[in-house]
Every structure is written in C-alpha cells, then in structure tokens.
Amino acid sequence: MPVEFLGIAATNDGSETVTRSGAAFDKEYTLRLARAHEDHGWDRVLFAYGSGSPDPAPAAAYVASRLERLQILLAHRPNVSYPTFAAKTFATLDRISDGRLTVHFITGGDDHEQRREGDTLTKDERYARTREYIQIVKRIWTTHEPFDHEGEHYRFHDFVSDVFPVQQPRPDVSFGGSSPAAYAAGGAEADVYCLWGEPLERTAEQIEAVRAAARAAGRTDAPRIQVAFRPIIAPTEELAWEKARRTVGAIRERREAGLVRHHRRRTGAPENTGSQRLIEIAGAGERYDRALWTATAAATGGAGNSNALVGTPETVAQALLDYYDLGVDILSARGYDLLGDAIDFGRHVIPIVREEVARRDAEQAARGSRTLTAVGE
C-alpha cells in the first residue's frame, strides 16, 4: 500500500530546543519551511493549533496559494467556531488549495488549555460535541439543500452553504486520541486516525482499538492510521546518540530556565490519556524496539508528539517500516531544527522508505499475477 509523510508547517523557527528568532507569525519562514517540505519529498504538512498561536487557517491559505503540490492538514478545535462557519472556511481553503485539504479535529485533552478560550465542558462532553460537529461539517460539505439541525450542542435552521470543496464527496477528516472516548468518536467519524509514536506492541493495540470502534459504529471500512515521531538522525549511530543526548539536554535546560512559551507550558501531571501513556512508557524504559527513545517525551512531561526515533537514516527508515508493517501508512515526523531536519529527513530517510515500500508492492503484485496465472491454467 502507498506510504505518505507528514511534516510540520510551523509559523516561526522556535522549537523545544531553540528560542524563536522573530515574531510568532514569520511570513517568510512559514513559506520557506513549507517549500522545503514540498521540495524534499513530503506529502503534506500540519498547521497545528494552540490557544495563543497564530490562526492556522489563514496561514494554511497563505502557503497553499504559493505552493502547487504540498497538501494541507489543518488542525481545528470545535470550541472556537460554530460548525456552519467552520465548514465554509474549510471549503474555501480546499478551493484555494485546489483540493489539497484534510481537516484534523482536536477535541482537547487539557481543561486549562480549553478554558483559555472559554471552553468549560468536561472531556466526555467535548468528545460528544466533536462527534456532532464533524457530522454537521460533513453534511454541509455534501448537502446542496437547506436543512435544520437540532442536536445536543448545536441548533440551527434553514442553512445551506454556497461554497463546496473541490474534493468529492468531501475532504478527509483526521482525528486523534488514546482514550476509549477518542476511539469511539474517531472510529466512527475519521478517515485518518492519528497516534503518537509508542512501542510497536502498544501501537498495535491502539490500532486494533480504533478498528474495533469503527466496527462497533457499523463501519465496513476503518480509518487509515497515522503515527508521529521526533526523528534524530546522523551519519553514524554514535553521532546520532550524541545528538540525541544534546537534544534532551537542550530541552531540559530551556524548561528549567522557564523559556517554554506560556501557552505550551505544562504544569503538574497531564490530563490527556495520550500524554499519560507516554510518561508511563518512558517510566518503564528508555529504549524500545529498533530505535524508539522515550527520553525526549520524559523531558517534556509527555507533551504531544515527543517520542524520538534515533539512529542513522537507514536505522530510522527501518524503524518506520516496522510501523508500516503494523498497518501504519501515514508517517509523521518533526525534528527539533525544523527547517534543517525537514530537509535532512526528506533527503536521507524518505527515499529509503519509499523504495522499500515500492519493492514490496511490486513483489506482492507479482505474486498476485502468478496466482491468477496458475488459477487460469
């Protein structure tokens, strides 16, 4: 099956190891980073969402209007706008990008972060709202006649949009989370289900949980699976591990100095299940499988996508192929030097993975051809 690569569309050059050099929205850097992904073999980039961060939708429109191939994954929190408004925004962006949009719906796993923008619902209530929100957006994208909606969280009457996506019947919907409520909502509604990088055994368990939720929702298909990592690569294993240790040192130093931006700073134990899982895994061991390293997740308190894959490009590529063998066909990667790591990963890791996947697909096609020939004889 085909494999795809997702990078990050940051609006400035700051990271967990580097203080940004300019404004939160640096127009030139935003385009430069996106173009580096397009020029080095990546399929799409994520425009992430934070309560105090630049609005990802206009940033995505800016990039989409200037690049021709790179696809857009737009993160969106349902609490920040009404679904009728959001559906039109997404459809317009799909028009601007000539059909290159996927929307990633974020329910929100941290009460404090949600309350920064006035969201006071409980976690379970948020998941119910997100599911209703996605259903409304899908209907708006595909309905050309006015309709009413009377739901638990949203009510409106006689609405019909005049702007529709390029993609038919609609853009894909992306979703993430590691709790039973997340599996239930995403299993029912998502085209792509996103996971943070965990050991292979734990990832396989999560994939089965997503597929079981899809079956329970009455689906005959299942969401595609995306898994995210923080690759740390170098020409030799020794240099890669030296780089990894420097990276963790920089993360710890910045956090101890209070240099993490306020809207990203985590105090106390994380509330969301995904981060709790990362901390638990890090507590049980620092290295797993071929190249998974949990020290970066431990250093950040399990903040978001934070488990690393460490090694040479060949080692990291083989580690990614291990996840591909589990059924993961979208591989998300983001380094700590956002621009330089995007270029290096695109040059040295992506080609290895694509070549191996193509080889396997060719072998499978050949086996299928031989089987058909034998049956016909």
Image (cartoon, rainbow, N blue to C red):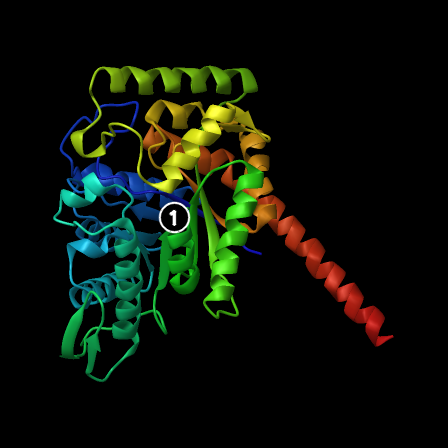
Count of number-bearing discs: 1
Picture coordinates of residue 315 (x, y %)? 58, 30
Q: Position of residue 233 (x, y in %)?
A: 48, 26
Q: Name which quarter of the figure residue 80 lies in.
A: bottom left
Q: Is residue 154 above or below residue 71?
A: below
- Badge 1: few (under 14), some or many (20 or more) residues near its Cα, within 10 Å? many
Indicate whether 307 appears above or below 54: above
User: Residue at coordinates 51% horizontally, 65% vertically from top-left?
Assistant: 215
The answer to whether residue 26 shows anywhere in this view is: yes
Q: Which quadrant does the N terminus fall into?
A: bottom right
Dividing the picture into quadrants, the one containing residue 97 is bottom left
Rendered location of residue 7, percent (x, y) = 37, 42
Instruction: Please report the residue visible at 23 percent of the width from the left and 33 percent of the height from the top.
Output: 264
| Residue kind at label 1, given as amino acid type | Gly
Can you name the residue that lies furthest to the bottom here?
145
135 lies above or below 74 = below
Q: Residue at the location (54% across, 55% down)?
A: 2
Which is nearer the eye, 301 or 33? 301
* 222 or 291: nearer the viewer: 222
Disc 1 secondary structure class = loop
Q: Tell me residue 158's x, y (percent).
A: 15, 81
- Residue 368 or residue 249, whichever sits in front: 249
The residue carrying mark 1 is: 177
